[in-house]
Each structure stands twice: as C-alpha cells, then as structure tokens.
Image (tube, rainbow, N blue to C red):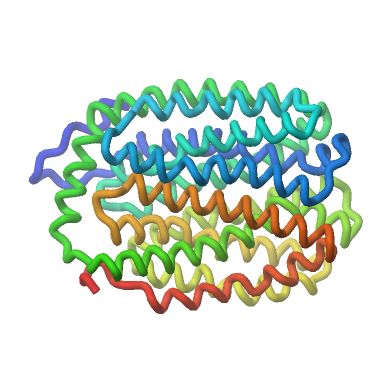
C-alpha cells in the first residue's frame, strides 16, 4: 500500500490513491456491519429481555451518543496532532462491544455493549474520513462516496447476517462477528503506515491549495454549517425511523415474518449504499448544491406516500427513499470541509458525530411515539422531515467567497 503513492511535489499532478481509499472503505464495511448487528437483533432482544420500544430507543441512544459526542473531539485532536495508530486501535472497542453484547442478558449490560460499539465508531469515522480526503487527489466527492459506501454496504449486510446467522444461532453468535474486528485492525495498521509516511504530506499540500481560495466570512461559514447540520437532522432522524423500527412496522402492519422483514430492511440499506456511490461523483461533476437540493427534497413525495402504501409498493418506495436520501451525505461532508478549510478532522467528526447523535435521539423519541401512538404514527410524522431541505437556498458558495 505504501508503494502506491510517493510524497507529492508542489508541481506534481494530483493522483487518486485508490488502494488506500478501497482499503479504508472495506474497513468501513466491516466496522458498520458490526455496528448494524445491534439494531438488526432488536426483535430478538425485545422478546428475550421483555423490552419496550422506549427501552430499545434508549439502547440506540446509548450507542449513538457515545459516538456522536466523541467524534468531533477525536477529529479536533487529530487536526492538531495526527495519530495514525488510532485507526487500528479503535477497532478494539468494537470487538469488546460485540463480545459484551453476545453475553448480555441484563439491560444494563446491553447498554454497556452498545456504548462500547459507539466508542469504536467515534475513533474510526473522523480519522478514516481524513484518510479518504488525503488519498482523493482532488476528487473529494468520489473519495467520500467510496469511503461511505463501505459503511452503507456494511449496514446493509448487518440485517442479512442477523437473518442468516444470529436469528438462527442466537445472541451468542455475535462473538463470531467480533473476529472481524481483528481483520479490520490488520488492514488499518497498513493504512496507518501509509498515513504516516505519505498521507500527512498530501493533506498539507491540500490545505495550502484551499488557503488560496477566497475565504468566506466567519458568519457565512458558520451559517452554512448550521444549514448543513439541519439537513443531517432531517436525513438521519428519518433513517432512524427505518433502521430501528422498519421491521416492527412491517410485522405489525402486514403480518410478515421476522426473516421477511429483515430482507426488506436489507433491500432498503442496499439502496442507501447505491445512492451513496452516486452522490459524490455527481457532486464533483455538477456541483454539490444541486445534489443536496435533489437528495433532500427529492425524497419528499416518496416519504409522503409510504404510510399509505400496501406491502407491494412499500418495497419500491423505501428503495427510492434510500437511493435519493443517501446521495446527499458525501456532498454535505465535502461541502462542509470546503466551508472550513484546514479543519478536516473536526468537520468530519462533527458531521459523522451529529449524524450518529441525531439517529440516536430520533430513535429514542420515535420509540416513545411508537409506544404511545402506535408504530404507524411514526412514519406519518416522519414523512414531512425532507421538507427541511428547503433550507438549501441559504447555503453560501465557498468557491466565490460569498
């Protein structure tokens, strides 16, 4: 891996280091597949531990909050003192979390395991996003898409793995998936060596180029960040309604089996993965604002139809929602990095962390709504969230400095 790129000269053309991007994307797949096993086994945990929807929402909150609070702090620290060995080290938290969850037969131990999973993500995401930008060679949207699609693919494989393995062999089989953390650790060790020997020079070169662009006034940059965070709120609260409660919705409304509901969830998450691949390159080619506009507002007609659809149309509608919503995140992250140049780790950590936090908070609130008003009410309320995308009109243009 270290032989695939040399330290750049100031006059050298930018080269996209695909070997590094694909390695970090594969580790993102492993990381998020391990993380997504938690919501994928919620139906089993609800039955075995006699949990309410509110308690399930609090488990998601424990996982998401530990990740969301720590990610910006990890990114802020890495901007000042890059730590390549943090990448393999962070996988040990995920390993410990899955081992605890495999043996968790009390609610408090379930919360501990979920929190350990969150800590693993808090280390992995900001530093790996930084590596993706290091290796981008100027194709930042493409690099973010390839990096993020690994995570989306992992999230899609989690329910499939749960349906094929965990549902059949029980909660203790989570210990088998914990071994994947060791594979990720080995790959990330090699990525860390490239980071140390070549990546730091690439990121310094990129920061010098960004400083030559017109600087946005601080107020406009912060306003743009606030608008992008509002869009992350709308996107991830809606996604939380599907990742945490879609199986319950299908079982309650249409009477399908747990396995069938898991396959529906897999189809939705696979569509999210495809949308992520498409969004970054389209942002590079046509402009990130256009992708953001389409992604958030384009999903609105489908989210409004979903609560009224029968089982046949529920599948295509959720696939369309996943495709369209997912295309925004690579464009949003790169747009934010351009608004605040030189703070890649902090911005990446902020947006990944905020997305985790909003997903966790949304899951907790929506769980309480489901307990009081029914699971179908959740989707009737969430249908209007994509309308927040209208705030895109307030986004500044970092390339023009206004």
Specify the quadrant of the image occupied by residue 71. top left
Residue at x 43%, y 68% (from the top left corner): 227
Residue at x 23%, y 35% (from the top left corner): 200
Residue 257 image offset from top left, x and y in percent: 88, 48
Residue 203 image offset from top left, x and y in percent: 23, 42
Q: Up-down: is 109 above or below 227? A: above
Residue 177 image offset from top left, x and y in percent: 65, 26
| Quarter of the figure with the N terminus | top left
Residue 221 image offset from top left, x and y in percent: 30, 65
Residue at x 51%, y 73% (from the top left corner): 389
188 displayed left or right of 46: left
| Quarter of the figure with the C terminus | bottom left
Residue at x 79%, y 71% (from the top left corner): 309
107 displayed left or right of 139: right
Q: Up-down: is 122 above or below 365? A: above
Number of on-image labels: 0
């Amino acid at each position: 891996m270290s032989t695939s790129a040399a330290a750049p000269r100031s006059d050298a053309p930018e080269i996209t280091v695909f070997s590094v991007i694909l390695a970090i994307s594969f580790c993102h797949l492993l990381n998020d597949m391990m993380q997504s096993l938690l919501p994928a086994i919620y139906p089993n945990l609800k039955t075995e531990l006699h949990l309410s929807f509110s308690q399930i929402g609090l488990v998601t909150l424990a996982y998401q909050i530990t990740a969301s609070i720590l990610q910006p702090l990890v990114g802020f620290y890495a901007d000042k003192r890059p730590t390549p060995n943090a990448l393999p080290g962070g996988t040990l938290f995920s390993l410990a979390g899955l081992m605890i969850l495999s043996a968790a037969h009390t609610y408090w131990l379930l919360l501990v395991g979920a929190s350990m999973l969150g800590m693993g993500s808090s280390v992995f995401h900001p530093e790996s996003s930084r590596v993706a930008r290091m290796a981008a060679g100027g194709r930042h949207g493409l690099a973010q898409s390839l990096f993020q699609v690994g995570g989306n693919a992992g999230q899609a494989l989690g329910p499939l793995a749960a349906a094929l393995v965990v549902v059949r062999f029980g909660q203790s089989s989570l210990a088998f998936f914990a071994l994947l953390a060791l594979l990720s650790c080995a790959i990330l060790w090699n990525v860390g060596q490239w980071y140390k020997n070549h990546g730091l020079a690439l990121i310094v070169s990129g920061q010098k180029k960004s400083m030559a662009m017109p600087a946005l006034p601080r107020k406009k940059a912060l306003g743009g960040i606030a608008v992008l965070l509002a869009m992350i709120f709308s996107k991830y609260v809606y996604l939380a309604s599907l990742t945490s409660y879609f199986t319950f919705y299908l079982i309650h409304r249409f009477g399908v089996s747990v396995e069938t509901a898991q396959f529906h969830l897999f189809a939705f998450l696979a569509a999210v993965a495809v949308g992520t691949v498409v969004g970054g390159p389209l942002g590079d080619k046509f402009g990130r604002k256009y992708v953001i506009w389409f992604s958030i507002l384009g999903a609105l007609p489908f989210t409004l139809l979903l609560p009224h659809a029968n089982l046949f149309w529920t599948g295509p509608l959720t696939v369309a929602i996943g495709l369209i919503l997912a295309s925004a995140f690579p464009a949003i992250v790169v747009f934010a990095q351009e608004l605040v140049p030189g703070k890649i780790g902090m911005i990446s950590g902020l947006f990944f962390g905020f997305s985790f936090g909003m997903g966790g908070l949304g899951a907790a609130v929506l769980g309480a709504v489901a307990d009081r008003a029914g699971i179908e009410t959740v989707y009737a309320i969430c249908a209007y969230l994509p309308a927040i995308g209208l705030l895109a009109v307030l986004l500044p243009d970092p390339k023009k400095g206004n």
